[in-house]
């Protein structure tokens, strides 16, 4: 049969992460610094709450918006931590990970040709999701010279009549860059008089190491124009449970829910019950994991610089986006050769934006022993490459 795939999907580029990791499958003794997920399993009390829910027969759909108890916990949590109120009835939607929330937001907001500003390097899904919703991604490139951070000037330069939204992700995957309250205020000032939606993917917010994370919704005038996105995958080590959430203006949450009710219907009930337990009783576990990631970050980044890879200090998340310029290899060649000769898996920088062929991303959410061994192997590889 003739393949009848739509042009939009036909020309969508495959994820640079998955594409590369097909190579890793089936290889033994590989140290994977590739896929971005915690090496911890979900804290036991959270797992137990899920087991208990099965034992009690909680195996059904939930309301489209998600269990009220979870929306209410999220609302209470944001109020307690940041002083911002979201109505759990109308302003919060539970989604299948932040991934679904990002997709719903694009679908709910964009008409053909609408522009969404994104920064690069960035999470692999943003540009494809914008394209799938007929929008146009307008890219601001960031670099190590400015700590991979956006400036108000960068944003002003690309704002246009067609700008519908701007998408921030901080701490950032893949660079770990984040913003202090002062830096963030400067950015939001640039958006003050503009009628555009701010999408703020703060999935790594709880994994900020050197200063307090400031949600963008806490800055003056921002709550009304912002869709705040967060979830349980990273901070609570719950990637497989698939629970995220979106908080925002009632009209936008209602529009997203319209799409959600016909596509996902609802997020999995077991994950939602587990997420309630996460919010009610598990923040200490988050802090413990965060302290461990901080230790690993310090060890890994100084190790990378010692072996001659220039790596800036990430302020959050659990990635290093290091320069491989000195090796004179492009990022795919570097990653493939490193994998085949030393069995260390990293992700080529081009997966996160076209201009990043001089970089690789490494996830340091793995044990200290493995990180030390990976540093030895990468060091050996670079030495050989330099000869
Ligand atoms: C910035 C960012 N947003 C969203 C996601 C997806 O998260 P979830 O598991 O909640 O769908 C990821 C996963 O790597 C991410 O890095």
Image (spheres, rainbow, N blue to C red):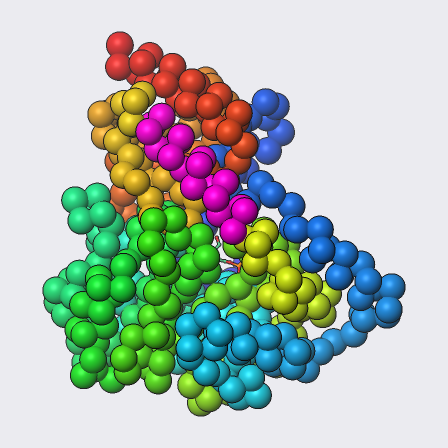
Picture coordinates of residue 256 (x, y %)? 50, 81
Figure quadrant of residue 145: top left
Tell me, yes or no, if residue 18 can be seen here.
no
Q: Is residue 213 left or right of residue 308?
A: right
Would residue 192 appear left or right of 279 to someone viewing this image? left
Q: Point out residue 304 in the picture as x, y percentages from the top left corner.
A: 34, 27
Residue 192: image location, x then y, percent: 20, 80
Q: Residue at x 53, y 46 (%)?
A: 289
Residue under the point 35% across and 84% down = 224
Asked if residue 369 can be seen in this view, the reply is yes
Q: Residue furthest top?
A: 387
Classify 364 as above or below 277.
above
Name the quadrant of the C terminus: top left
The image shows residue 307 at horizontal and vertical percentages of 31, 21
Q: Nearer the viewer, residue 137 or 193?
A: 193
Principal SS element in the magenta part? helix
Residue 14, above or below 262: above
Q: Is residue 118 magenta?
A: no
Bounds of the magenta segment? 287-304
Nearer to me, 93 or 329: 93
How many marks on residues? 0
Viewer-nearest residue: 81 or 303: 81
- Look at the picture and state if 354 lies above or below 65: above
On screen, residue 299 above or below 66: above
Q: Is residue 289 magenta?
A: yes
Q: Quadrant of the N terminus?
A: bottom right
Query: Residue at point 37% right, 55% down?
Result: 171
From the viewer's perspective, is 316 left or right of 87?
A: left
């Amino acid at each position: 049969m003739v393949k009848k795939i739509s042009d939009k999907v036909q020309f969508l580029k495959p994820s640079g992460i998955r594409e590369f990791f097909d190579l890793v499958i089936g290889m033994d003794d590989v140290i994977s610094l590739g896929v971005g997920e915690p090496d911890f399993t979900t804290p036991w009390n959270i797992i137990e709450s899920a087991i208990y829910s099965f034992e009690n027969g909680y195996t059904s759909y939930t309301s489209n918006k998600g269990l009220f108890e979870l929306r209410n916990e999220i609302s209470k949590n944001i109020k307690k931590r940041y002083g911002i109120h979201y109505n759990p009835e109308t302003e919060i939607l539970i989604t299948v990970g932040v991934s679904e929330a990002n997709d719903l937001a694009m679908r709910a907001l964009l008409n053909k040709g609408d522009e969404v500003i994104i920064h690069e390097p960035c999470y692999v899904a943003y540009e494809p999701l914008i394209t799938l919703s007929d929008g146009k991604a307008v890219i601001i490139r960031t670099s190590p010279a400015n700590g991979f951070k956006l400036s108000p000037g960068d944003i002003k330069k690309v704002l246009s009549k067609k700008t519908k939204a701007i998408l921030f992700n901080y701490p950032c995957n893949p660079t770990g860059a984040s913003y202090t309250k002062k830096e963030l205020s400067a950015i939001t000032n640039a958006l003050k008089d503009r009628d555009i939606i701010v999408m703020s993917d703060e999935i790594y917010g709880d994994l900020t190491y050197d200063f307090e994370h400031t949600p963008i919704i806490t800055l003056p005038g921002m709550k009304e124009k912002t869709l705040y996105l967060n979830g349980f995958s990273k901070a609570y080590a719950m990637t497989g449970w698939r629970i995220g959430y979106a908080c925002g203006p009632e009209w936008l949450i209602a529009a997203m829910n319209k799409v959600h009710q016909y596509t996902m219907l609802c997020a999995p009930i077991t994950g939602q019950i587990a997420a309630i337990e996460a919010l009610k009783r598990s923040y200490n576990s988050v802090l413990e994991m965060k302290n461990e990631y901080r230790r690993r970050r310090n060890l890994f980044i100084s190790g990378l610089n010692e072996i001659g890879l220039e790596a800036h200090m990430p302020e959050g998340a659990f990635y290093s986006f290091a320069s491989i310029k000195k090796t004179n290899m492009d990022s795919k060649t570097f990653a493939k050769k490193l994998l085949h000769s030393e069995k260390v898996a990293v992700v080529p920088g081009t997966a996160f934006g076209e201009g990043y062929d001089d970089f690789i991303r490494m996830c340091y959410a793995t044990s200290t022993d493995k990180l030390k061994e990976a540093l030895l192997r990468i060091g050996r590889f670079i030495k050989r490459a330099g000869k």
